Amino acid sequence: MMKAPLQILNSTFGYHEFRGPQAAVIEALVAGDDVLVLMPTGGGKSLCYQIPALVREGVGIVISPLIALMQDQVSALRELGVKAGFLNSTLSSQEWWQTESALQRGEIDLLYIAPERLIQPRTLELLHSLKISLFAIDEAHCVSQWGHDFRSDYLKLELLHREFPQVPRIALTATADLRTRDEIVARLQLHNAQQFISGFDRPNIQYRIAQKNNPKIQLMRFLREEQAGNSGIVYCMSRNKVEQIAEWLCSEGFTALPYHAGLAAQMRQQHQERFLREDNIIMVATIAFGMGIDKPDVRFVAHLDLPKSIEAYYQETGRAGRDGEAATTLLLYGLEDVVKLRQMMAQSEGSEEFKRNEQQRLNAMLGLCEITSCRRQSLLRYFGDNLAQNCGNCDCCLTPPQTWDATEAVQMALSCVYRTGQRFGAGHVIDVLRGSNNEKILSFNHHTLSTYGIGKQLSVDEWKAIIRQLVARGLLDVNSDGFGGLLLNESCRPYLRGEEKIHLRREIKLAVSSPRRANLSQAIDAQDQSLWSALRACRKRLAEEQGVPPYVIFHDATLREMLEFRPLTPEQLRTITGVGDSKLKRFGEEFLAVLREAEYSV
Ligand code: ADP
Ligand code: ZN
């Protein structure tokens, strides 16, 4: 008798219900239709093909470019009691042969394979000798020649349609733009596929963007007050800064590792491995880190420098919370970031058009930083997605920013930039406004200007915030000569003359921790802390014994439910999300022992 999808979901994966379009996708595939699935990261794409492969007769072939992950994916399935294997270049010829004969004996239900392997004649011959339940083409956007992840081998996957016309295919991606989607359909011959398109939103990610005023203290508070014991990534722009921050975090008692392209390959590998396998590592990295990292329990992503574009920001923050559990992202940015990036772009090698493009992307990113309405709405709108209501899970929603009528102050600032000859950076302009009498002011005779000292009522930080917002809004330009002088431009004219009103964001000092947090479910109560640690220690021990990352044993969500419901018998434990038959049998007693001890040692 064929098992029903829901039954497999429960007995094998330990989950109680399907999420979003999973049930419909699975139904289509089980019925033999082709399918295109577009779902955000963490949406649950894997089950869409894993369950049909278990329902249908034969072996399901999963094509994935991420060779480094195959071993872990297969280990995870085996822990669930699923007969899984993989074929890629990391296998010895003996392992290859063993997998091949297991396939021929019908002992494998799910086979992961790299695209370059699949298209080899020898592999195709092998596949033709087997009963195949389905082909799953993961990361299907790799067929797009315009995307960042283009793989020429993916183009050849079109042969699946010709050589195996009767086998249903499912293509999956998290990259949602229309052009890529059309390309996938055209290149993989999926014209008859049912399409399941979900939005871009990652509701479990909390977006926060704050003014950078003392980044180290801001980061420290964030880590200590909200993220104690969690894994996460801290992104910095330069290699130098990566090393400094990592070293400083270690001196503060955190386990932080540096990662950037200048480190020896072996060290990078080792740090990545530790990040995947250990529980509370902070990876301090340049953007070189992240591609193909599929760690589901990254609880936070912090940026100490401004990303170049919304695309980059969304991709980098997207590495948080792939397991669907609450995750937090924090971006700290300041005027110096804007100046630095503008200059880097102006001085880069590309054509004028390329530079204009880059500047526009940066402007969009700055716009996101400065808005006072819901960040998520604005993010999604940028990608062509609509969110009808405020999200309630970004800093603007949680602590609505105040604005103030800055018309007069803006007029002072612009006028001071003009009077000083449009040659000086923010620091000097602010000194003039506040009537400082340092050497530089005296030597340029700036104490005689009409704008000298007219802005004493505002602090240096307040002036910085004003100038930053003017640059971000494109009312002031930054000279690309390397000195960062501020320049007026056409659009600032009405403000300079005071003809138009302008409202700016009022900065709250050290606005790192939001007072109301939607993420409270993530925090562990003090009285539960020791049981939580004991459960995590048990998971870590088992993970080491099995040679797999901890999340392969149980996800955080599963441990959290154990904490909440305190199961004491195998029957009770089996009702916890993520505890299926196989894991109950293999690890149940170990976790029950921990839970019972906590229950009876009062
Ligand atoms: P994607 O590939 O879309 O990024 P995954 O397939 O890795 O996402 O799933 C993300 C997380 O959600 C995983 O931890 C997975 O076990 C979990 N998950 C998926 N479907 C369900 C479900 N129906 N119920 C509970 N958890 C689920
Ligand atoms: Zn919001």
Image: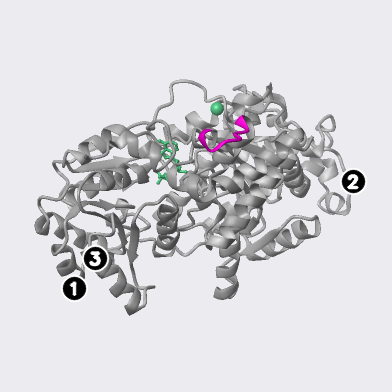
Q: Are marks 3 and 1 in contact (CB under 8 Å)?
A: no
Give the percent coordinates (x, y) of residue 329. Answer: 60, 41
Relative to 270, say whether 449 is above or below: above
Answer yes or no: disc 1 within 8 Å of ligand 1: no
Residue 16, horizontal then vertical, whole percent: 42, 31
Image position of 186 with respect to 467: above or below: below
Query: In whole angstroms, how far apart are the C-alphas of marks 2 and 3?
Result: 73 Å
Badge 2 marks a residue whose secondary structure is loop
The kind of secondary structure element at disc 3 is helix
* Residue occupied by mark 3: 118
Disc 2, disc 3: CB below 8 Å? no
Q: Amino acid at mark 3?
A: Leu
**Amino acid found under the numbered disc labelled 2:** Asn
Q: Quadrant of the N terminus?
A: top left
> At 58% from the left edge and 56% from the top edge, which residue is drawn?
542
Tell me where the magenta segment starts and ends, as one range: 565-571
**Label 1 packing within 10 angstroms: few (<14), some (14-19), many (20+):** few
Residue highlighted by disc 1: 122
